[in-house]
Amino acid sequence: MTRHRRLIPLLALALAAWLSPGPVGAQQTERAKKLGKHLICMCGCNQILTACNHVGCTTSTAMLKKLDQVVARNEPDDLTLQSFVQEYGESVMAEPPAKGFNRLAWYIPGFAFAAGLTIVLLVISHWRRRITLATAGPAGEQISPELMARARQQADEETED
Amino acid sequence: MDLFGSFALLLAFVSAAYAVAAGIAAVITRRPLLIKSARNAGMAVCLLVTLGMASLVYLFLTDNFYMAYVVGHSNRDLPTFYKFAALWSGQEGSLLFWSWLLSLYVISVLLAYRGKHPELMPYVGVVLAGVQLFFLTLNNFVASPFKVLGAMGPDGAMRLVAHADGNGLNPLLQYPEMVIHPPMLYSGYTGFTIPFAFALAALLGRYPGEKWIHLTRRWTMIAWCFQSAGILLGAHWAYAVLGWGGYWAWDPVENASLMPWLTGTAFLHSVMMQEKRGMLKVWNVWLVFTTFLLCILGTFLTRSGVVSSVHAFAQSSIGPWFVGFLALILAVCILAFMKNRDYLRSDNQLDAMVSRESSFLFNNLILLVACVAVLSGTLFPVLSEAVQGSRISVGPPFFNKVNIPIGLFLLFLTGVGPLLAWRRTSLDSLRRNFGWPLLGGLAAGAVAYPLGVRDFYALVCVVLSVFVALTISSEFLRGALVIRARAGVNLFSAVGQLTMRNTRRYGGYVVHFGMVLIFVGLSGAAFNQDKQMEMAPGSRMELGPYSLVCQMFTSRPEQNYTAERATIEAFRSGKQTMMLYPERRFYPANEQAGTMVAIYSTLKEDLYVVYAGRSPENNQPVIHAYLNPLVKWIWLGGVIVVLGTGLALLPNRQAVLVVRAAARTVSVGAAPQPVTAPVQSFKSHD
């Protein structure tokens, strides 16, 4: 019985080795690593190809193997990546291609910044205009003690932080 | 016990529905009895949801395998510690956990403001009860955790079916941080409901002044602190468990937690404009609304299957419920705003371009742009599929390209903002405040460049980090020197006194300093190295200054899994430094494998070793080692951010002491007048 118990972990490990995917190719060159960072693992995990080692992934091993093979052909980077696009479609690329509709993905943050900046500048100019109008009011008005007290309190509050 | 839990949740649903109905009636009629009744119903929800949670805990602890949820997420050998984590590991349990946390917040608010703010609290109660009602609807009718397993018997009657054992908890979740990370993050998400409820209530009830801001500042900071801690714990978990050498992958679920954090951060800054100058009222209200909407959107993304992620829950039919809820909240917010927008008119105007006010405007702009960039990148694959018919990927390279410059600009503003004066900053003051920090930053860059920091963004990050750290230090130093001169105490004591006199301000600086450390840590990613090779016992791998020598591979059975462990001896410059034990684990209950990374962490770098499995060709063990510089700074920065937030939550010391003195004076019958003046001069912002 004790012997059987000792066998259980070994059997479990054998099962684990059988069930779990093999490790990624151990012979990756620096160029393959660099290009692998531009590709997504197509198992659905949405992770970078060279970073994907999540439990149950069977796709990354094959993709990395192919990457090693293509890199060994010593073709230019864009051709190497293109061979993946041909096989897996555009979703294999880790960033949206800067063409057609997908260019919008790159433009949105810039648009947001430009729009936000415009709004901020408009708000500031609006506020500045209000202060100019306020200071251009009738001259020689006496400041009431209440107003002075309120101004002092406001100044105290505003200089605290 | 399952019936008890179901019944408790059903009663909680009824109570929440009653709290909404009675609350609306109370708002309209202003009858005190109705107000009290609605509040009591709101508090009863907490008790009932707690009973529901307790029932589910009991079912997990007693291995009740009649329950579908227990079967799906636990097994007999699962350590008790992880049986608690199993509660929120699935869709149904995590939604119940969400309701429970929300109910704790709600009862805290209702108790804290019992009998106070009679004009505002009925509205707040209605909004909070409305949000609770939505989640309790899901708990009861869409994703109940109390479903039992049944099968049709030969006589046609349904019978309970018990499994001998459960499927176990996902191996990736069997890690101590996974017991802490989700509660932290959920506390952040649910916590933002409180400022949302107050903002909407103030708008609906046209509650005068900035009172709602004062009331919710601490709640917002608590939620923000939980969210920050949750995000960082999640990053640490990803780093220590997933075994890919990184901590942030711009995964949709990670992004979902970051977005409300960004808008929440913007709110915590811009709120000061409203408190001090009565400005940005519309902006602040919409920032709070947006933060809450992003919390719900994040939950929707995680649970609906709209975006693919390793962290997401299984695809389910829950998505339309969240879409409906999002639409409803948005409609209510827009209607309330349109109806009462004149109430949000600014009291003041901007005096000068170079001022604290304008720095807050730019800080908000940049935080919002970061949020838009993250949101658009996260949803763009869905948009692309809808428009073009084919899905594209938006991965880390896109997010890094867009967000690194934004982050660096924010870091710059972190240093600049606090040193600008309210209203107007003179050129002379600019020179005085920024001269030395700027020189210090540039000097740091000049030192870092020849030392090998050649990556442009990393170099800019070094310059800005030193600049910001020096501006923060100079702020502490300037105040402390004044106190030292006046009170005759030493410098450390003066710094302590200074901090405790205005905890919000100096706590904020501590948070900023924590963020600087985080940025320094992030910049280290530009210099990561890694190597992977097959390693038989006795073989050696060289990585940077380290030599890794494989000693042996062993296997050992544990309570819930079997581990294959590599023993790796690490040498640095020829000296033995550390023994590392990376593991590959196999969990029989769900027949899944997982990794346990071995990390030797120093302030300079992390040696991160993964046992990647065995080579399919020759069955040799494969070791993947990473050298990740400065990662520890991120975790240290996180701790400082949390401590700084805690500090900012404390009341100002001087005010407390003076109030106590006043109380003592009053109790012995003396006139209180002499002590009221100091209270004003050091008064808390709340």
Image (cartoon, coloured by chain):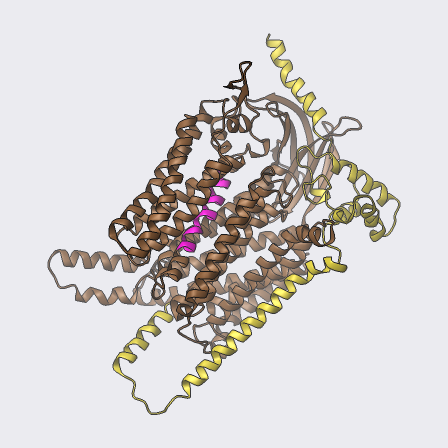
B2 left or right of B466 in image: left
The answer to whether A65 appears left or right of B224 in the picture is right
Q: Is residue B513 in sight in this rendering?
A: no
Tag count: 0
Asked whether residue A36 appears in the rendered view, the answer is yes
Residue B457, given in percent of the width and then of the height, sits at: 65, 59
Range of residues picked out in magenta = B180-197
B619 relative to B682 in the view: left or right = right
In the rendered view, would you say A49 is above or below B280?
A: above
B184 inside magenta stretch: yes
Q: Residue at x 62, y 14 (%)?
A: A6
Q: Is residue B540 magenta?
A: no
Relative to A147, does residue B366 appear above or below in the rendering?
above
Split into 4 quadrants, where in the image is the C terminus of chain B?
A: bottom left
Identify the chain drawn in brown. Answer: B
Q: Quadrant of the N terminus of chain B?
A: top left
Front position in the image: B50 or B325: B325
**Most common secondary structure along the magenta stretch:** helix
Considering every residue shown, the one lying at the far top of the view is A1
In the picture as drawn, the residue positioned furthest to the left comes out as: B669
Q: Which chain is yellow?
A: A
Most distant residue in the front direction = B156
Give the image location of residue B311, x and y in percent.
Answer: 60, 40
Q: Position of residue B8 (x, y in %)?
A: 38, 33
Q: Residue furthest bottom?
A: A140
The residue depicted at 83 percent of the width and 53 percent of the height is: A78
Above or below: residue A147 compared with residue B569: below
Residue B228 image point, x, y percent: 50, 50
The one nearer the camera, A13 or A80, is A80
